[in-house]
Image (cartoon, rainbow, N blue to C red):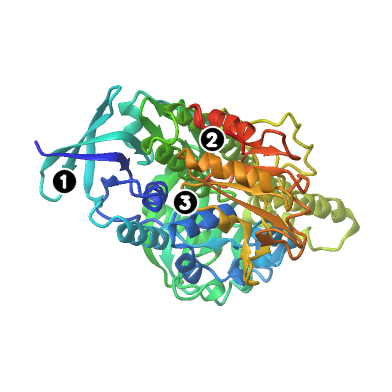
């Protein structure tokens, strides 16, 4: 049997696997990706890409193309709730409420202050081909779709995988030092004895991917997600434009989600689902080309472990979420950003294998929180429906009457209207969850605590408060270089390299980093100040966020999380920095003596 050898084997060609491939390639780590599927996804599925995900995809070299193909920012600036969609009722399609969503298309100042990128929205049927093309450009001949993992085994030396080329029928072996399971839980997890733990099932959903012209009824161009309380069915329908050439009301394709009670047999009939959707939205005879009907449960699942030996799980292989909040795909992208630099460091001999032990302690709490938040987002959506008095147990007329109370203007209906509006405003926890998306922090052996306590959040969901406390993401700030060219501070962190950022008087720290670099550690160093330094802080944005003095320093990991900091200077900066690297990398770091 033919054998091939690679430092890393990636199993799975979705968002997690393809992103992992591009990140490894950027760090010059040879690898092979195999996917059992003959091509990329034929389902729209996940589509929202948050700020940090877009930063990571910029690292991969594909963010600009994604932005170009994405929903224009102005057409994903809001989400809204409606009383029905179309039909003979004079109030059909009446807007109940509208909320800003995902940074209001780049207009929300808190989102602009968090990142130089803006949110994007591109369904997986169009996103994954972009990712696949990017991976193939970086690793030609090493992205193999229709190549299926049959089995794997591992020992202290590495992983052996049996792969079948489904086109030719040939079976071959791939030996690797490490394996990333990004196959959505298809086979890798079971091969390493990992099981899945459910966090609860809320409901079942049927999804239609259709081509249709809904522009006559979808009036709001700035609304991305339409949450439609349907009096005819007593349930909620969600309608999402999918492009590809136009967005908003003019979109050529749509995804329509219809909720069912768990066990409802109608959810399992394509004809029944189509009939229910048509009745719910009030368009029994409108032209509608149905591409695919899929079914899924509104639930959340976590793997019992994210790793076993030399095999690591990422994305849907490690955790699966409801789509509410758009946290599934983005969490997958964050997983592989965390994992790949660690693999690269170990493979290149910079770090001990112990560094890899920090993957699960860092990612599991974040992914678990995201899964729980997704469930809570979904639960509150159902609470909105119930609070408004819409129920499948009511007649359509009763549902109409209950909804009409929201705009009747009658004093006896005011309390109900205010309660529904309150419940809808609470859904900002889904559409303005900036601190969930961006503000989480890591705790592990790969983070050197400075003894400081995390600040109590203003709002743990909605308000991101930048910090350089170890474990936090590197705060955003705009800087000027020596030629006056503006760049974001994140761009200073190069693939697979650490970055030491010192204050304007922190030259001793930069010299210490230079000595560390001479011992083989990939670390760059520079000073940032408003007037003096290697780079300049024209808006004092960095000064307001750095939380160190003029002679202090922070150390940033290759994934742009703060690994260590010293608020001020040190009498022995080289030894102190070497000790920090020793903890992070899990091995002694020797440096030349102090000058």
Q: CA distance from mark 2 to mark 3?
A: 25 Å
Q: Which is in the foreground here, disc 2 or disc 3?
A: 2
Q: Which residue is mark 2?
A: 592
The residue at 26%/45% (across/down) is: 36
Q: Which residue is mark 3?
A: 495
Rendered-image quadrant of the N terminus: top left
Within-10-Å neighbours for mark 3: few <14, some 14–19, many 20+: many
Residue 205: x percent and y percent?
Answer: 49, 47
For mark 1, give the secondary structure. strand
Q: Which residue is mark 1?
A: 165
Q: Which is in the foreground here, disc 1 or disc 3?
A: 3
Residue 442 sits in quarter? top right
Q: Is residue 287 left or right of residue 36?
A: right
Q: Earlier in the sequence, mark 1 or mark 3?
A: 1
The residue at 14%/51% (across/down) is: 167
Q: 343 or 577: which is nearer to us?
A: 577
Q: 331 or 139: which is nearer to us?
A: 139
For mark 3, give the secondary structure. loop
């Amino acid at each position: 049997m033919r054998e091939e050898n690679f430092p890393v084997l990636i199993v799975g060609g979705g968002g997690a696997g393809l992103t992992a491939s591009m990140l490894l390639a950027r760090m010059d780590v040879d690898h092979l990706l195999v996917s059992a599927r003959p091509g990329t996804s034929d389902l729209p599925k996940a589509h929202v890409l948050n700020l940090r995900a877009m930063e990571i995809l910029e690292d991969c070299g594909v963010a600009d193309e994604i932005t170009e193909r994405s929903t224009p920012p102005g057409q994903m600036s809001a989400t809204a709730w409606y009383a029905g969609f179309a039909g003979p009722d004079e109030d059909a399609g009446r807007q109940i409420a509208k909320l800003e969503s995902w940074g209001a298309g780049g207009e929300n100042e808190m989102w602009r202050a968090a990142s130089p990128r803006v949110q994007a929205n591109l369904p997986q049927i169009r996103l994954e081909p972009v990712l696949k093309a990017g991976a193939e450009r970086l690793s030609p001949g090493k992205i193999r779709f229709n190549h299926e993992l049959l089995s794997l085994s591992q020992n202290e030396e590495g992983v052996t995988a049996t792969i079948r080329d489904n086109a030719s029928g040939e079976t071959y072996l791939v030996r690797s030092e490490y394996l990333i399971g990004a196959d959505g839980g298809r086979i890798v997890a079971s091969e390493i004895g990992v099981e899945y733990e459910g966090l609860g099932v809320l409901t079942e959903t049927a999804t239609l991917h259709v081509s249709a012209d809904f522009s006559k009824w979808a009036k709001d161009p700035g609304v991305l997600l339409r949450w439609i309380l349907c009096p005819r069915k007593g349930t909620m329908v969600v309608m999402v434009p999918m492009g590809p050439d136009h967005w908003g009301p003019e979109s050529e394709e749509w995804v329509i989600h219809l909720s069912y009670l768990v066990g409802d047999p109608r959810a399992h009939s394509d004809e029944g689902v189509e009939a229910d959707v048509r009745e719910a939205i009030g368009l029994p005879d409108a032209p509608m080309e149905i591409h695919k009907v899929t079914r899924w449960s509104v639930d959340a699942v976590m793997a019992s472990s994210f790793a076993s030996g030399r095999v690591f799980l990422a994305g849907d292989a490690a955790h699966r979420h409801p789509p509410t909040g758009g946290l599934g795909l983005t969490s997958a992208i964050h997983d592989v950003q965390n994992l790949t630099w660690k693999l690269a460091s170990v493979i290149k001999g910079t770090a001990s294998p112990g560094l890899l032990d920090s993957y699960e302690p860092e990612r599991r709490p974040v992914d678990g929180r995201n899964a729980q938040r997704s469930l809570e987002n979904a639960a509150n959506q159902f609470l909105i429906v119930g609070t408004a008095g819409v129920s499948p147990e009511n007649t359509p007329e009763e549902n109409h009457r209950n909804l009409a109370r929201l705009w009747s203007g009658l004093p006896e209906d005011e309390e109900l209207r205010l309660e529904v509006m309150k419940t809808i405003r609470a859904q900002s926890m889904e559409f303005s969850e900036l601190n969930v998306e961006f503000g989480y922090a890591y705790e592990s052996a790969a983070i050197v605590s400075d003894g400081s306590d995390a600040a109590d959040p203003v709002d743990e969901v909605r308000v991101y408060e930048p910090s350089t406390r170890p474990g936090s993401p590197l705060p955003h700030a705009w800087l000027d270089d020596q030629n006056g060219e503006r760049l974001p501070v994140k761009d200073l962190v190069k693939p697979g390299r650490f970055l030491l950022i010192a204050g304007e008087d922190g030259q001793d720290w930069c010299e210490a980093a230079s000595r560390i670099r001479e011992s083989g550690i990939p670390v760059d160093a520079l000073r940032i100040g408003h007037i003096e330094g290697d780079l300049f802080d024209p808006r004092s944005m960095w000064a307001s966020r750095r939380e160190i003095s003029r002679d202090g320093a922070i150390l940033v990991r290759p994934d742009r999380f703060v690994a260590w900091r010293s608020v001020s200077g040190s009498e022995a900066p080289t030894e102190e920095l070497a000790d920090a690297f020793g903890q992070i990398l899990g091995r002694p770091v020797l440096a030349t003596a102090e000058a």
